[in-house]
Image (tube, rainbow, N blue to C red):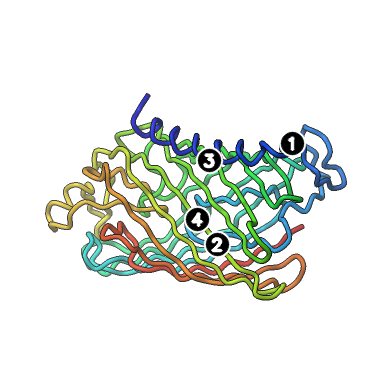
Amino acid sequence: MTRSRFSLSIVAAGVATLGITFCSAAPCFASDRKGEGCEGWFPDFSCTSKGFYAGFSRPMTMPYLFEHPFVTTDLQAVGIWQELPERSVFDGGHADIAALQIRIALTDRLGLIAVRDGFVWFKPDLGLVSHNTGFADMSFGLKYALIDRPDAGFILSPTLRFEPDFGDHKLFQGQGDGIVIPGVSLGWSPSDGVHVLSAVGAQLPIDGRRNSSYIHYNLHVDYAITPKLSPFVEVSGIRYTSDGDGSTNVHLQGGARLTLSEVQTALNAGRFEGNDFANLGSEGVRGDNVITGAIGFRFQATPDLSIGIAYEKPITSRRGLLKQRVSIMASYDF
């Protein structure tokens, strides 16, 4: 067993233990929330289950990785402005991302999720590196509500996603032969108005030379000050458990290319990775930790439409490609 899989197993075992402990006083594996066409075990596209518990709001940091535990049918538009650190190989600049996430409840417990996609505008300040636009990587997979107890305000759902080699290489997307992303997430309401979402998962590349491996973990806490408005705080982290060989290409002005390792050495930029934006396969990042903090709010404009905004920045010395980030999301439930 590799070190990354071993570490993930320990964290997942902790989350599972929490779920089993919660279940000791109640039967957890029978959902008490049904919707029309949602009662079976097999996919039914007529399912109209309203998966979100009342009062919970969606998470906003690490939008490609921090998956909420609820089985829903919805569309979520995502807009991100991300500033790059000055002390990096790109000498500052920013990346802008526009994406559309799709979730489909196949049954009351089983959901299809396609949460990574979109178009990227990459504009580094370093004049040597070219500005590029193109498509981000895609990921898709399944979510299963293993424990679903709206009466007790508790839900736990494992997820499994796959990220193929799809995106534009000039944007540091589509590296390697694809990445498997297992995870588990939970939701809990410990008291009236207080809602907790948490997730843990891993990026496990098929080609460990072209991509790094890491564990991600996330925590969201919100408080509904009115039925429509919920401010929140979030903490998200990444721990790199293995690194790549640094062979990712950096595209320069005029069409020339250098490997990431060559550019890092030439500019004395030090090691860094791409956080949740890109898996660069950088050398020397094993053991690095990047933790970010965020504040924001969600506004329930209508029963089916919510809008959120969040501001995020690193709280560790390691920052990767993130100096600060503003995220805006609009979610529509069907």
Q: Nearer the viewer, residue 298 or 43?
A: 298
Q: Nearer the viewer, mark 4 or mark 1?
A: 1
Q: Which residue is mark 2?
A: 221
Asked where in the image residue 55 lies, by quadrant, the reply is bottom right
Q: Quadrant of the N terminus?
A: top left
Q: Could you tell me residue 241's position as x and y percent? A: 32, 39
Q: Residues within 10 Å of mark 4 (few under 14, many from 20)?
A: many
Residue 27, label in figure: 1
Q: Is residue 208 left or right of residue 230?
A: left
Disc 2 residue type? Val
Q: Nearer the viewer, residue 135 or 29?
A: 29
Disc 1 residue type? Pro
Q: CA distance from mark 3 to mark 1?
A: 18 Å
Disc 4 residue type? Leu
SS class, disc 3 = helix
Task: Relative to 89, say whether 240 is above or below.
Answer: above
Q: CA distance from mark 2 to mark 4?
A: 7 Å
Q: Residues within 10 Å of mark 1 (few under 14, many from 20)?
A: few
Are the residues at dot 2 and dot 4 in contact (C-beta closer than 8 Å)? Answer: yes
Residue depicted at x 40% and y 31%: 5
Disc 3 residue type? Val
Q: Residue furthest top?
A: 1
SS class, disc 2 = strand
Task: Relative to 274, say whether 157 is above or below.
Answer: above
Q: CA distance from mark 1 to mark 2?
A: 26 Å
Q: Residue furthest right?
A: 36
Q: Which residue is mark 3?
A: 15
